[in-house]
Image: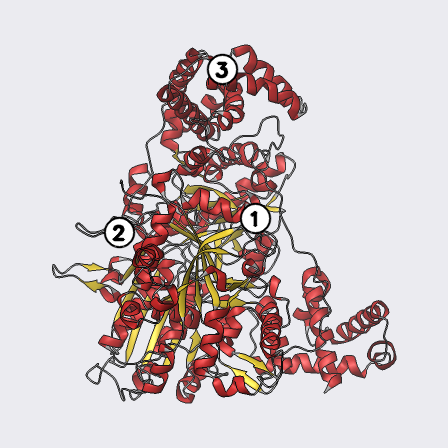
C-alpha cells in the first residue's frame, strides 16, 4: 500500500488532531463512535472535540441534534423540565430556535441564549477570564465541541456533502471544503469554485449568519468567507504569510504535517474558537435592518494574531510597555485597533508579580485611549461597543483638553481623541498617576489636512510652515520625549511606515541593540494578497521616459517625431519650465487615462510639487493648458494658509472657489480629475479613484512610500488593476525610490526602463510557431474594431486554438513556452503602451489578438481550467483594461456594478437606541458630515439647531400642513417652504449657514432631512 494523499487523508488528519482519533481507526478497532465519545482518555489526547455523525444532523434546522439535546439535558435540566410537560416540546424549542436564528443569526444566540416560553437556555458557556471563578471554568468545560466529516446538509439533494463541519453544542460554527495539491486541486481555485457554484446556499446550513464562517482549505493555504453568495462570493485569505509575502511558511525541520496545520493546532482549538466568537466576530449593521443586509466580520489571520499577542504580552509584562505594529495599508487597521481596544479593557494580569497591577482580579488598564484623526474610527468604535460589552456608555470622545480630563477622571473605559491632543494626553496620564492606561496611536490617517500637525506644532510652541515636511511620528516621539514619562501607561503605535526614531521608541529591542516591530504585516503581503496595488509596477522617471524614446529613435518602424520634439526640448534645455512639464502631464493624462475611460471614466491624478509656490504655478499652467483644450475637466489645488507669488496673495479656497474643508469631497466628484499639492494630502488621504501621479519633488524615505501609496487603494467596483496605476517622476531616480521602499516593502518589483525591442524578439518567436496566420490577426482586428458580433470573432480565435491544441502536435513544454511568451508580450506591451506616444501597428494588432487567444490555450485538459486559472492568478497585472483604441471603452473583464435596492421592508418610526438623546445623535451625525470645521462647541451647535427647530414649529403653517398632514409628499413640500422662510429670516444672524443652504444642493438636502427629524423629535416629546 502507498501513502494516502487525497482529501480524505487531510480530513482524517484534521479529525485525529481535534478528537484524538478518527473514523478509520475506530472502524479497525471495532468500536462505536458513541463509545469513543464517552471515553475521556481518548477525548483528552486531541483538542477536546467529540466525533460527530452525519446521521445526527437535522438538515431542516441545521443542528447536530445529538449534541444539542445532550448539552441542554446535562447543563440546564431544570429549564428543560419547564417545557417537557408539553407533548411537542422538542419541536417547540427547535421552531423558536429557527425563528430567532433567521432573524438575528447564530452569533446572537451564542451570546444571548434562547428564550422559549418561561424557559431561558444558554447555548454556549463563554471562555473564562484569568480571574474567573472555578464554576465558570467548569461551565466552559461542559461545552460540546464536535467535528463531523462528509456532512449531508441538503434537504433537496440528500447526497450532497460538505467535507468538514465544526459544531459547538450542536450549532454549526465552521464549514470546510478540503482540497489537496497532490490530487491536482487547491483551495484558492477549486475549493472556492465549489462553494461558489456547487453548494446550494438556499439550504439552512449555508444561509447567511446561520454558520459563522466557511473555509476553503488545502495543505498549503486557507481562504474564508462569512457570506456565500454564488459567483459573487468574496473569499479573504486566512494565511500567516511566507517570507513577508502571501501563503504560509514551511514547517520547521523535523516537524510533521502541512503548512495549514495552524488551523487545527491553533485556530480551531476550543479556547481559540470560543475567543474568536466572543471577542472578534461581529455582525455589523443597524438593529432594525434585515439580517441579509448586514455584514459578518471574521478576523484575517494577522488581525487575530496581533491582538492576541498584544493581550498575551500585556498580561505577562504589565503596564509601561511599548508596542510597534507595522501593518501595511490594506491590512484592516481600523478593525485591528477596534478589537485591540475592546480586549485591552478586559485584560487581566497573569499573576501577582506583573508590573503596575493593583489587584489580580481587576483589569490591568483602567482606560484605553485611542489617538486617531479618523472620525470614522471614532464612530465605528462607538457603534460596535454593544456587540462586545454588556455595559453601555463606556466610550467617550474627547476633542478638547477639558473633555479629555473629565473622561479620564470619570473612568470611561475607551476614550477617543485626536493626534493634536497627544501632548495633553501625556500630561493627563502623568497627573492621574493612580490610574493605568493603554494608549493606541493610529498614525495611518494623520494628515488629511495640515491642520492636525499645525495645531500640534502650536501646542508645542513651534512655528508652522507647510513647505517644511511635517511628520506625525516625529511629533508623537517629540511629545513623549519632551515630557516626563510615567510608568502608568503602555503605548501601542500602528503604522505602515515606521521611521527609525519610531522603531527606537516603540519597537522591540534585539540582543544586538537593533529594533524591530512587535508585529508585521508587510506591504509585499498586502500586494500579493490583492488588498492594495503595486504602485511600482508602472513607475517611470523622466530619464527612463527619454531612454525609451532613445531606444527607438533610429528605428524606421516608429513615427516618434511628436514625442521627440517635446522631449528633446527638455533634454537640450537641461531645466524644463513648469509650463512644459504641465504639457507633458496633460499629454499623458488626457489620451492615456481620460480618453481611455480608465476606472469606468472616473480615474483621477495627483501632481506633487516641490513647494506651495510651485504648486500655484503648476495649477495656473495646467488651467491655461486645459482652457486651450476646451476645459475637458476641472482641477483643484491644496495647501494651507496664504502664499504670495509674483506679488499676488493666494489661498486654497480662493483658487478653488469653495471652502478648504470641502476640497476632499469636491475632488471626489466626477468633474474634478487632477489634484495639485505640495505637502498636503501626501499622507493619509484615501481616494481609490487616484491612478496616476506626476511627481516633481524630492521624495525619499517614509515620505516617498506614503506619497506614492496614495495610488495603491483598490477599487474593485471600478475595475482598478495594477496596470492602471502609473507614476511619471520628473525628479527622482528609480534607485532613489527603490531605496525608499525596500525597508517597508521587503521585496520590490521596481525595475529599470524596459528595452522595447524585446517585443520584436517575442513577436518573431510567436510568429514562427504557426499557431496563427498574420491574415487572421488582421481579419480579427478589422472585425473587432468594427464592433462585429462576438460570434463572428469566435471562429477566428478557435481556428488558432485548434492548431495549438491538436493540429501542430506541440509537446506540452512547447505549448507552455508559447503561452508564457504570449502572456509576456501582452504584459510588456500593455505596460509600455501607457507611456509610449507612438504606435507600432503590428504590435497593437497582435496584442488584441493574443488577449482573446490566451484564455483559449489550455496547457493540459482540465474540467474547470484549474491550471489556467492558477497561471492567471500568479500575476495580477496580466489581465485587465490596459489599452483602449480609438477612444472606445472595450471592457474585456468588466463586471457590472451591483447596487442594493431600496429596503422594501417596513421601517419603524423610532430607532432602538434608548440610551442617548435622539437630538444628540441627529446633531452629531450632521456635524460629522458637514461641520467638521465649525468653530462652535457641541452645546452651541445644539442651541442653534433647537432655535431653528422652534422657529419652524412656530410657523403658522407648521401644525396644519406638516404635523397633522398624512400625505408624505405634500408634507415634504410644505416643510421645504417653511424651512426656506425660516432660513431667509435667519440669514443675517447665520450668514455662513445660509450661504451653504442657498448654494450647496447636497448640503441643503442633508440639512432638510436633519431639520425634519429635529422637528419630528421635538413635536413627539
Q: Quadrant of residue 70?
A: bottom left
Q: Secondary structure at mark 3?
A: helix
The mark nearer the N terminus, 3 or 1, is: 1
Report the side of 7 relative to 840 (left or right): left
Check contact, mark 3 vs mark 1: CB within 8 A. Answer: no
Q: Position of residue 582 (x, y in %)?
A: 50, 37
Report the side of 315 relative to 808 (left or right): left
Q: Position of residue 961 (x, y in %)?
A: 87, 76
Badge 2 local density, few (<14 within 10 Å), some, or many (20+)? few
Instruction: State the residue position of label 1.
Output: 232
Instruction: State the residue position of label 2.
Output: 257
Pair 2/1: label in front = 2
Badge 1 local density, few (<14 within 10 Å), some, or many (20+)? few
Q: Secondary structure at mark 1?
A: loop
The quadrant in which the N terminus is found is: top left
Q: Secondary structure at mark 2?
A: loop
The mark nearer the N terminus, 2 or 1, is: 1
Point 62% across, 43% down: residue: 896
Q: Position of residue 267 (x, y in %)?
A: 35, 62
Q: Give the numbered dot on residue 803.
A: 3
Check contact, mark 2 vs mark 1: CB within 8 A. Answer: no
**Looking at this view, is 420 or 627 the one in front?**
420
Residue at the outermost front position = 30
The quadrant in which the C terminus is found is: bottom right
Q: How many angstroms separate mark 2 from mark 3 (CA)?
A: 44 Å
Report the side of 248 relative to 172 (left or right): left
Q: How many marks?
A: 3
**Looking at this view, is 519 or 103 the one in front?**
103
Amino acid at each position: 500500500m502507498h501513502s494516502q494523499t487525497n482529501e480524505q487523508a487531510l480530513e482524517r488528519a484534521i479529525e485525529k488532531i481535534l478528537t484524538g482519533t478518527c473514523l478509520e481507526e475506530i472502524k479497525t478497532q471495532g468500536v462505536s463512535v458513541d463509545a469513543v465519545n464517552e471515553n475521556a482518555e481518548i477525548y483528552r489526547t486531541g483538542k477536546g472535540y467529540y466525533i460527530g455523525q452525519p446521521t445526527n444532523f437535522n438538515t431542516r434546522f441545521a443542528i447536530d441534534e445529538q449534541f444539542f439535546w445532550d448539552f441542554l439535558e446535562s447543563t440546564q435540566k431544570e429549564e428543560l423540565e419547564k417545557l417537557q410537560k408539553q407533548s411537542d416540546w422538542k419541536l417547540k424549542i427547535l421552531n423558536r430556535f429557527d425563528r430567532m436564528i433567521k432573524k438575528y443569526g447564530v452569533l446572537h444566540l451564542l451570546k444571548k441564549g434562547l428564550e422559549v416560553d418561561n424557559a431561558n437556555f444558554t447555548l454556549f458557556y463563554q471562555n473564562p477570564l484569568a480571574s474567573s471563578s472555578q464554576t465558570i471554568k467548569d461551565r466552559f468545560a461542559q461545552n460540546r465541541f464536535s467535528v463531523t466529516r462528509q456532512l449531508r446538509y441538503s434537504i433537496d439533494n440528500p447526497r450532497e456533502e460538505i467535507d468538514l463541519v465544526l459544531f459547538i453544542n450542536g450549532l454549526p460554527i465552521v464549514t470546510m471544503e478540503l482540497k489537496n495539491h497532490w490530487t491536482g486541486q487547491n483551495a484558492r481555485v477549486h475549493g472556492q469554485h465549489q462553494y461558489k457554484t456547487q453548494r446550494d446556499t438556499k439550504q439552512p446550513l449555508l444561509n447567511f449568519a446561520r454558520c459563522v464562517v466557511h473555509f476553503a482549505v488545502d495543505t498549503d493555504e486557507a481562504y474564508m468567507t462569512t457570506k456565500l453568495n454564488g459567483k459573487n462570493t468574496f473569499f479573504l485569505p486566512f494565511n500567516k504569510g511566507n517570507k513577508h509575502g502571501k501563503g504560509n511558511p514551511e514547517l520547521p525541520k523535523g516537524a510533521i504535517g502541512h503548512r495549514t496545520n495552524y488551523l487545527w493546532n491553533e485556530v480551531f482549538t476550543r479556547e481559540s474558537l470560543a475567543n474568536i466568537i466572543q471577542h472578534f466576530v461581529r455582525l455589523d449593521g443597524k438593529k432594525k435592518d434585515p439580517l441579509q443586509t448586514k455584514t459578518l466580520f471574521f478576523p484575517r489571520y494577522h488581525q487575530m494574531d496581533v491582538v492576541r499577542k498584544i493581550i498575551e504580552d500585556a498580561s505577562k509584562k504589565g503596564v509601561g510597555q511599548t508596542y510597534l505594529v507595522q501593518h501595511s495599508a490594506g491590512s484592516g487597521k481600523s478593525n485591528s485597533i477596534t478589537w485591540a481596544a475592546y480586549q485591552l479593557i478586559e485584560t487581566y494580569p497573569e499573576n501577582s508579580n506583573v508590573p503596575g497591577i493593583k489587584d489580580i482580579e481587576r483589569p490591568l488598564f483602567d482606560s484605553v485611549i485611542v489617538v486617531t484623526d479618523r472620525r470614522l474610527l471614532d464612530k465605528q468604535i462607538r457603534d460596535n461597543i454593544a456587540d462586545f460589552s454588556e455595559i453601555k456608555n463606556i466610550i467617550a470622545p474627547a476633542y478638547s483638553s477639558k473633555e479629555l480630563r473629565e473622561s479620564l477622571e470619570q473612568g470611561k473605559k475607551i476614550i477617543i481623541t485626536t493626534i493634536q491632543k497627544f501632548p495633553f494626553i501625556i500630561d493627563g496620564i502623568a497627573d492621574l498617576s493612580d490610574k493605568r492606561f493603554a494608549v493606541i496611536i493610529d498614525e495611518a490617517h494623520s494628515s488629511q489636512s495640515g491642520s492636525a500637525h499645525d495645531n500640534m506644532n502650536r501646542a508645542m510652541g513651534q512655528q508652522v510652515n507647510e513647505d517644511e515636511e511635517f511628520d506625525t511620528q516625529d511629533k508623537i516621539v517629540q511629545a513623549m520625549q519632551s515630557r516626563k514619562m510615567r510608568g502608568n501607561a503602555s503605548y501601542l503605535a500602528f503604522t505602515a511606515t515606521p521611521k527609525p526614531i519610531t522603531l527606537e521608541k516603540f519597537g522591540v529591542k534585539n540582543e544586538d541593540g537593533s529594533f524591530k516591530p512587535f508585529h508585521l504585516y508587510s506591504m509585499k503581503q498586502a500586494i500579493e494578497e490583492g488588498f492594495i496595488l503595486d504602485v511600482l509596477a508602472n513607475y517611470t522617471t523622466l530619464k527612463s521616459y527619454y531612454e525609451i524614446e532613445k531606444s527607438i529613435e533610429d528605428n524606421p518602424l516608429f513615427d516618434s517625431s511628436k514625442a521627440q520634439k517635446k522631449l528633446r526640448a527638455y533634454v537640450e534645455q537641461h531645466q524644463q519650465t513648469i509650463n512644459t512639464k504641465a504639457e507633458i502631464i496633460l499629454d499623458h493624462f488626457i489620451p492615456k487615462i481620460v480618453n481611455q475611460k480608465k476606472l469606468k471614466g472616473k480615474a483621477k491624478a495627483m501632481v506633487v510639487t516641490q513647494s506651495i509656490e510651485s504648486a500655484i504655478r503648476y495649477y495656473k499652467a495646467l488651467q491655461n493648458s486645459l482652457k486651450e483644450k476646451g476645459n475637458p475637466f476641472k482641477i483643484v489645488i491644496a495647501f494651507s494658509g496664504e502664499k504670495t507669488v509674483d506679488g499676488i496673495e493666494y489661498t486654497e479656497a480662493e483658487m478653488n472657489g469653495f471652502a478648504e474643508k470641502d476640497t476632499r469631497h469636491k475632488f471626489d466628484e466626477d468633474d474634478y480629475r487632477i489634484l495639485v499639492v505640495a505637502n498636503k494630502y501626501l499622507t493619509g488621504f484615501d481616494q481609490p479613484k487616484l491612478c496616476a501621479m506626476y511627481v516633481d519633488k524630492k521624495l525619499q524615505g517614509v515620505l516617498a512610500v506614503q506619497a506614492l501609496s496614495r495610488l495603491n487603494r483598490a477599487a474593485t467596483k471600478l475595475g482598478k488593476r495594477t496596470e492602471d496605476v502609473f507614476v511619471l517622476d520628473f525628479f527622482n531616480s528609480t534607485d532613489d525610490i527603490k531605496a525608499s521602499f525596500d525597508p517597508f516593502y521587503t521585496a520590490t518589483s521596481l525595475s529599470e526602463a524596459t528595452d522595447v525591442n524585446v517585443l520584436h524578439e517575442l513577436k518573431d518567436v510567436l510568429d514562427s510557431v504557426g499557431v496563427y496566420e498574420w491574415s487572421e490577426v488582421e481579419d480579427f482586428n478589422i472585425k473587432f474594431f468594427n464592433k462585429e458580433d462576438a460570434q463572428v470573432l469566435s471562429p477566428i480565435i478557435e481556428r488558432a486554438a485548434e492548431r495549438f491544441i491538436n493540429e501542430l502536435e506541440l509537446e506540452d513544454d512547447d505549448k507552455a513556452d508559447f503561452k508564457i511568451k504570449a502572456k509576456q508580450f501582452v504584459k510588456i506591451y500593455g505596460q509600455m503602451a501607457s507611456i509610449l506616444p507612438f504606435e507600432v501597428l503590428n504590435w497593437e494588432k497582435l496584442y488584441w489578438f493574443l488577449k482573446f487567444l490566451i484564455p483559449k490555450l489550455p496547457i493540459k485538459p482540465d474540467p474547470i481550467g484549474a491550471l489556467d486559472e492558477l497561471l492567471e492568478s500568479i500575476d495580477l497585472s496580466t489581465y485587465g483594461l490596459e489599452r483602449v483604441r480609438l477612444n472606445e471603452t472595450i471592457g474585456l473583464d468588466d463586471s457590472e456594478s451591483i447596487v442594493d435596492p431600496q429596503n422594501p421592508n417596513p421601517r419603524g418610526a423610532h430607532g432602538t437606541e434608548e440610551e442617548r438623546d435622539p437630538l444628540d445623535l441627529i446633531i452629531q451625525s450632521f456635524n460629522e458630515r458637514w461641520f467638521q470645521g465649525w468653530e462652535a462647541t457641541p452645546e452651541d451647535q445644539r442651541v442653534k439647531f433647537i432655535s431653528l427647530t422652534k422657529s419652524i414649529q412656530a410657523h403658522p403653517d407648521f401644525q396644519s400642513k406638516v404635523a397633522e398632514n398624512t400625505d408624505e409628499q405634500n408634507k415634504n413640500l410644505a416643510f421645504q417652504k417653511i424651512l426656506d422662510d425660516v432660513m431667509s429670516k435667519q440669514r443675517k444672524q447665520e450668514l455662513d449657514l445660509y450661504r451653504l443652504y442657498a448654494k450647496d444642493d447636497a448640503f441643503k438636502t442633508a440639512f432638510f432631512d436633519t431639520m425634519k427629524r429635529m422637528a419630528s423629535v421635538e413635536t413627539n416629546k
